[in-house]
Structures are given as structure tokens and as C-alpha cells.
Image (cartoon, grey):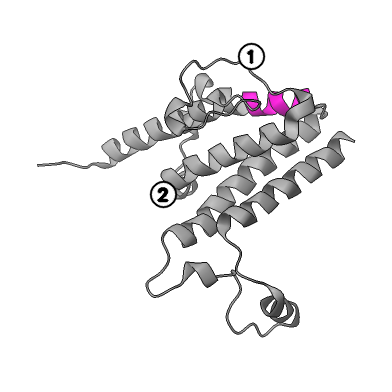
Amino acid sequence: MLSITSTSVLRHSTTRISQRRESRACIRPSQAPSTSSSLCEHCTHEGRACATRWRESLGDYCRELRGWYRSHRGMLALARTEDLTYLVAPGHLRADDALVGFFLDVGLAPQDAYRAWTITVLQIAGFAEVWDSWHDHPPGGADPASWTGLPASAELPHLRRLAGEAAAEPPDELFESVIAMLTSGIAAMAG
């Protein structure tokens, strides 16, 4: 008989969070691996992206992180509902340190590197949690291909205008616009 306790769920969740952080740390922004299984093979911390290719590198990183979030459905919900900060060991922060280092290497000031780091993670996590989650696991009877995120009968003037002009955009296409907006914002900060 399989016994599931809150301790076993927490242990599993902590392990998965650790694996996520290690996976993010292992991504070499200038050479993102093509499969999630190869993310942590030969993990090194000297593989920061070249500043001349930072846009491509950031896009690769974001796509890999989005893929991780999609394949680990429910982890964001757990992170929101449980305070797991006491379980974070210094090694778990390597991924965050690597991403901040990437932004510093691009030429951002420390305060802007902090902003770029938090906004990048929030944008990717939010997209996976809201948009991808709805498309990957739609409510019964819903058609993900036609979903625009707007109510079918928008009563408010600005949403009604968007509903009339918005076409259903595949999630991958919309995600690329998220990356474009993210890189534009970082470029503006880098001056």
C-alpha cells in the first residue's frame, strides 16, 4: 500500500524545487541544451552568456525555464501556498546567482540586474501558470485554440475593442512576444 504523508509530499516537493533550481543554474545562456534531461550534465558556472549574444541567450533560457514549469505542473501552486524558504540551502541559489550574473555581464547596474532577474522569473512563471496551464489542461468543453484570455462578451469599452480585434494566438507565438518585450526592457535598462 502506498502511503502519502505531508512529510513525503514536502520531501518530494523540496527535491523537485532543488532540481528546478539546479536545472536553471545549469543552463548556459549562450548554449542552452536542447533537452531538459541534459540540463545538468556537465554543469559549470563559468558558462555565462556572451554580452554580444545576450538576446538570443535570454530567449533560450526563457524557453527552457518555461518548459520546466510546464512539465512540473503544480509546483508554482505549491510554492505559493507553502513557505519553503527555510529549506533553501546555499547551493539552491546557484541558479538565481547565475541569472543575476548573466544580467550583470550584459552591463546592467546591480539594481537593474535585480529587477531583470525578478521580472524574468515572474514573467516566465506567470505565463506558464496562467496561459500554458489553461491551454495544456483546459476546462471541460473549452476550446484552447480559440481562447484569447478575454471574456466572450466583454462589456467594458477597451476589452470589447480588444475582443473585436484580437485573434487567438497560439501560446508559443504569444510567448515569443513576452521574450521580445522582456529583451526590449532589458535593452532599455542597459542603455
**3D distance between C-alphas at marks 2 and 1:** 32 Å
- Front position in the image: 62 or 155: 62
Q: Look at 80% across and 44% down and name the residue there.
A: 185
The residue depicted at 46 percent of the width and 36 percent of the height is: 84
Q: Quadrant of the C terminus?
A: top right
Q: In which quarter of the image is residue 60?
A: top right
Is the magenta region chiefly helix, strand or loop? helix
Whether residue 110 appears in magenta in the rendering, the answer is no
Q: What stretch is highlighted in magenta?
A: 97-105
Q: Where is residue 117 in the image (x, y as percent from the top left)?
A: 68, 36
Above or below 138: residue 119: above
Mark 2 is on which residue type? Gly
Identify the residue at horizontal 50%, vertical 42% (top origin).
Answer: 67
- Decide which of 146, 95 is in the foreground and name it: 146
The disc, 2 or 1, on the residue closer to the chain's N-terminal end is 1
For numbered disc 2, what is the local secondary structure? loop
Q: Which mark is residue 74?
A: 2
Is residue 93 visible in the rendered image? The answer is no
- How far from the left and from the top, in percent, is residue 178? 68, 51
Q: Mark 1 points at which residue?
A: 46
